[in-house]
Amino acid sequence: MFEVRKNSPNRVLADERFKREDARSYDLAAEAFARLSATYSAPVADALVSTASVAAGDRVLDLGAGTGIVTKRLIDAGARGIAADLSAGMLRIAARTSPVVRMDAEAFAIQPGSMDAVVSLFAVMHFPAPKTVLSECHAALRPGGVLAFAFGAPAPWPGAMLRIPQALLDRAMTQTGRMLRAPQALNARLRPGSG
């Protein structure tokens, strides 16, 4: 369905260790994540597909697809969707309903100019180099193609006094495998009042 190209051997990727650990944290939580996504992310997934205005037959890449909640909706709408993620555990679930490809969002394995749309639901927090990701998305799109991303942010904490204990708790939860990872630099930029 999709032409795949090989990643450039001399491409420099940002924070390979973070990406491996992030994908692994989702591998461990894939089944629970699928259940929670079906409950809490469904309305946003519907809105993202609607915003992308995909038509039957459109080739659409769901970048950072996780368990494929958006990809399934794309396919149900008649699009030729493919779920792309680094987490093998998440892709195992997505593969139950959709074609999948394991790939790095910073080094696409998709033929340039081959997509009618690229969509992404809450995945930007997992891309250490968002500018590179956007450049890769642009290259993958045909002329006039659509890019539709939905951004998420952590719930705000009232006051600075609560942020210190929360940061310590977040660190402990991440180290014990009870919390999924995301680049802390992006999280800090998404906090209310941080500019």
Image (cartoon, rainbow, N blue to C red):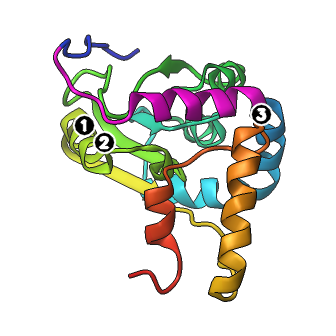
Q: Secondary structure at mark 2?
A: helix
Disc 2 from disc 1: Cα separation: 5 Å
Kindly identify the residue that appears in the image at 19 percent across and 36 percent down. 139
Is 55 positioned to the left or the right of 136 in the image?
right
Name the kind of residue labelled 3 in the image: Ala
Q: Is residue 83 visible?
A: no
Name the kind of residue labelled 1 in the image: Glu
| Magenta-colored span | 10-28
Q: Is residue 99 magenta?
A: no
Disc 3 from disc 2: Cα separation: 25 Å
Tell me: residue 20, above or below residue 148: above
Tell me: residue 114, above or below residue 76: above
Q: Position of residue 167 (x, y in %)?
A: 66, 64
Name the kind of residue labelled 2 in the image: Val
Is 25 positioned to the left or the right of 21 in the image?
right
Q: Secondary structure at mark 3?
A: helix
Picture quarter with the N terminus: top left
Picture quarter with the C terminus: bottom left
In the rendered structure, find residue 29 and report the number of the disc placed on it.
3
CB under 8 Å between callouts 3 and 2? no
Q: Position of residue 190 (x, y in %)?
A: 48, 71
Picture quarter containing residue 93?
top right
Q: Secondary structure at mark 1?
A: helix
Q: Which residue is mark 1?
A: 136
Dominant secondary structure, magenta = helix
Judge the density around disc 1: few (<14), some (14-19), many (≥20) Cα neighbours within 10 Å.
some
Q: Which residue is mark 2?
A: 133
CB under 8 Å between callouts 2 and 1? yes
Kindly identify the residue that appears in the image at 77 percent across and 57 percent down. 40
Tell which circle, 3 or 2, labels the residue nearer the N-terminal end: 3
Kindly identify the residue that appears in the image at 43 percent across and 22 percent down. 103
